[in-house]
Image: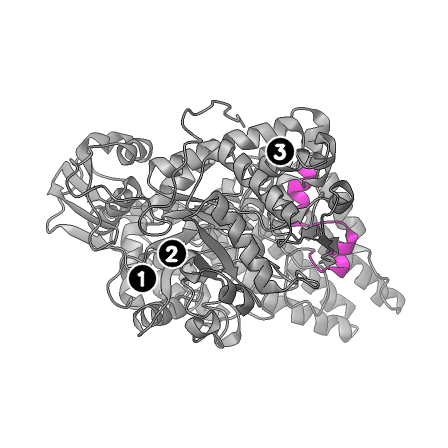
Amino acid sequence: MHIARRTLLGAVAGSAALGAVGVPPAASAGAAPREGGAAAEALARLLPRHRAQVAFRTVPRRGGHDVFRVSGGAGRITVEGTTPAVQLTGFHRYLRQVAHAHFSWSGEQTALPGRLPAVGAPLTGTANVAHRFVLNDTNDGYTGPYHDWDYWEHEIDVLALHGFNEVLVYAGADAVYHRTFTAHGYTDAEVRRWVPGPAHQPWWLMQNMSSFGGPVSRELLDRRTDLARRIVARLRELGMTPVLPGYYGTVPPGFAERNSGARTIPQGDWMGFPRPDWLDPRTPHFAAVARTFYRTQQELYGATSMYKMDLLHEGGSPGDVPVGDAARAVEKALRAAHPGAVWAILGWQRNPRREITDAVDRSRMLVLDGLSDRRTTVTDREADWGGTPYAFGSIWNFGGHTALGANAPDWAALYHRWRTKPGSALRGIAAMPEAADNNPAALALLSDLAWTDGPVDLTAWFEQWHVSRYGARDAGAARAWDVLRRTAYGTTRTDGWSEQADGLFGARPDLSANRGGTWSPRQLRYDAAEFDKALPALLSVAPELRGSTAYRSDLLDVTRQCVANRSRQLLPRIKAAYEAGDRGRFGDLAQQWLDWTDLLEQVVATDERHLLGGWISDARAWGTSDDERDRLQTDALSLLTVWGPRASADAGKLHDYANREWSGLVGGLYRLRWKTYFTELDAALEEEREPRPVDWFTLEDRWTRRPPALRARPTGDIVRVARTVASRL
């Protein structure tokens, strides 16, 4: 895949925070409306045949809030909004409600008439929160560490269409750290060995690990720098805020020995990985490194108004450093470089500790709550964080699992109530799936919360969803989405989960397996038989509505989920047959398991977004030599299988954390594991002995380092395969 190298003039032109925190300054009340601009350019990319039928104009904020208004007759649509991104949000509202079209993370419906339909009564929208944050720290790893500009250009457009205005950007942080520490006692080669491969960099940036998947080359750093410049430049053109990583103390090994007087605190291990040391933020050395970091970052990508830092993330140890003092020092370094910036911090596990929120300027911190829809004990974030502004957030697919669904009832019930209660500190939404490009209904619904007056009626929302999703009202589609609303999108946090259960075809083989990833739900969170009803309903959708990528994406997702759910019904039967010593029945059921695996492979092979071969091709395209291409391939593939070395895969329990139902994984590694396991169990039954243990890591690591040839293009037709699946349910 081609990696663009063009340098963008002005890419490093940053802007200090002005007005509302994290929100670009509004046009002055007396300024002339701006015609066209970045929104028009986006429309030309998205709907080139209709670009001349839409005029975009910039208007001031109203009462400090982002607003849009869409009006006009057929073929003459006027969209007014406070920023180009908000203008796109308004246009997308028009597409969904009037033209019955839309864009999403997974599929789109753009079969529009030659002349865009008239608006009728003007459509208006006002954002009820200033912060509309999107993407998880893990996104660059689990979504696609080797995506190029073509991907990111479209991704940014889709995020703008959905109303987001703050986008986490981790790409290019490796170059900042590289330049920073070569200025503080390290050689070029030493830092490049410390930096992990791109697939694993998110966890390095969270101070969990280092080095794995590396070393990175100078050419790779340069290419990622160029990509990051293009991303932040486009976000600024659209009036969106790039959220960049801040500096909170991560250092390479031996920092104190190379910098006289420096003080570092060992951080122990994280899931079998040695964590990088933490530089005491109270010291002059920390201030010096932070100055270099922020200066370098600004030279490369410009300044922004929000910086993401997760101090003491997932078990980080303060040692003898008072947490409050450390937080004040981290904040002081940020303020020295960017006086008006916001410190964004993830609300996860114990973080942010109360000592942190008590120590900093709360008005310049934003907590991105990752537990809003996961824990019933989360009831009063104002008390938990001392009134610190926070964003209502959701993480709905840990590791990038392909499981369909989300806790939509929690979103509808809690967001409006928490936002409007007296003394509320809720100031935003945060869409933070660990991997993007999935669950389009979840993305649309969560983003709609920020633009909806009053609570969302889920029944009405899902009734309308299929109309814009497929282009017209349809009885079959309505039935399908009502089933999905009540099952996969009808779960709640009462069971302690915010994601749906992964399938067992991707689990390490065990007759008692109840999840693929160690931290996945132990059981299906809805009625599988009820969910199955969505598949024949989708297959009954009118033929004229089946041509969009949106329909085919949904049909694949529902079909895939139906097959995945079979694993939870079949495995207990296989176990019972084995424990009864019934070799014939065991063999029959084991073959049924492998047959379902083969059928699942056929399902996911029909779509390019579900091809492991594409994931590998993307990684290899970034290499400049055969050796580097092989290294990048292993970096990318290991994340989905063993995750890291044996210590992290086994003792750290990270193996299959990012399991997913993709062609190449299902028919490759997953089938190989279960076939190997069933063969050994059959031999044990025949020989009346205990089964011999299998060294799964050795098998997985060997497969990861030398995978078989994998298809990079889709094959088969999802409608045909879906009908086959439906006939076997």
- Residue placed most toward the observer, 81 or 332: 332
Task: Please tell me whether mark 2 sits on a helix, a strand or a loop.
Answer: helix
Q: Quadrant of residue 314?
A: bottom right
Query: Which element type, helix, strand or loop, lies under badge 3?
Result: helix
Real-space CA distance between mark 2 and mark 1, rounded to the nearest whole angstrom = 9 Å
Disc on res. 179: 3
- Asked if residue 667 shows in the view, the reply is no
Q: Which of marks 1 and 3 is nearer the N terminus?
A: 3
Quarter of the image with the N terminus is: top right
Q: Gap between marks 2 and 3, in whole Å?
A: 41 Å
Decide if residue 603 is on the left or right side of residue 659: left
The label on residue 462 is 1
Magenta span: helix, strand or loop, mainly?
A: helix
Color scheme of the displayed model = one colour
The residue shown at (62%, 30%) is: 220
Of the numbered discs 2 and 3, the one sitting upstream in the chain is 3
Q: Where is residue 688 in the image (x, y as percent from the top left)?
A: 88, 69
Q: Is residue 245 shown to the viewer in this render?
A: yes
- Amino acid under label 3? Arg
| Label 2 vs 1, first from the N-terminus | 2
Residue topped by disc 2: 441
Q: How crowded is mark 2: few (under 14 residues within 10 Å), some or many (20 or more)?
A: many
